Amino acid sequence: MSQNMITTFSLQQTQLEESLDKILLPPTDPNAEVTEIPGYKLVYVNGGCPRNYRVYKADSMIGVIFQHLTHWSNGVDSLRYAESVDAAVGLDKFLTVARVSRTATEQPHTEEQLLDQEFDVLTSDEWERLKRYVPETRDLVPA
């Protein structure tokens, strides 16, 4: 391995680390390229065409939208949006519907399943169910 290859590799590694640092900048970072739109913040990540933006609602990232030459898109549907805010709202609505439909189809956990979960992830309703739960003792054998 020649000295030139090592130098090239080191330079590429440094460039990669610098680009990753820019991609991961939060919207509060003074070096982040942030665009504020009603209800959302867009943080430029990278790309020429399309340009990639992370979308934040409040302090949480909800997804990514893309700025093309003639339109915006969001990766969760095949629509072309005229404005960035429309693409962000479309992404947000899609995620809201997905969350509601997933919640509606999930069956509640049994008490045994709740006992296997970590305490800090249980909801107050699940805690109440566990307080009232009396396990069946027919399968218990004295030691």
Image (cartoon, rainbow, N blue to C red):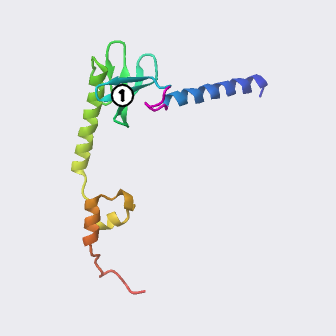
Seen from the viewer's position, the closer of residues 39 and 121 is 39
Above or below residue 111? Residue 83 is above
| Label 1, residues with CA under 10 Å away: few <14, some 14-19, many ≥20 | many
- Residue 139: x, y in percent? 32, 80
Query: Residue 92's x, y, as percent?
Result: 28, 33
Where residue 103 appears, x then y in whole percent?
25, 49
Disc 1, SS: strand
Is residue 126 shown in magenta?
Answer: no
Can the viewer see residue 30? yes
Q: Residue at x 45, y 23 (%)?
A: 33
Q: Relative to residue 15, is residue 82 depicted above or below? A: above
Say if 135 sits above or below 95 in the image: below
Residue 37 figure quarter:
top left
Rendered image quadrant of residue 71: top left
Is residue 123 shown left or right of residue 120?
left
Range shown magenta: 24-30
Q: Residue at x 28, y 25 (%)?
A: 38
Q: Which residue is mark 1?
A: 41
Instruction: Please identify the quadrant where the N terminus is shown.
Output: top right
Q: Tell me where residue 60 sits by quadrant.
A: top left
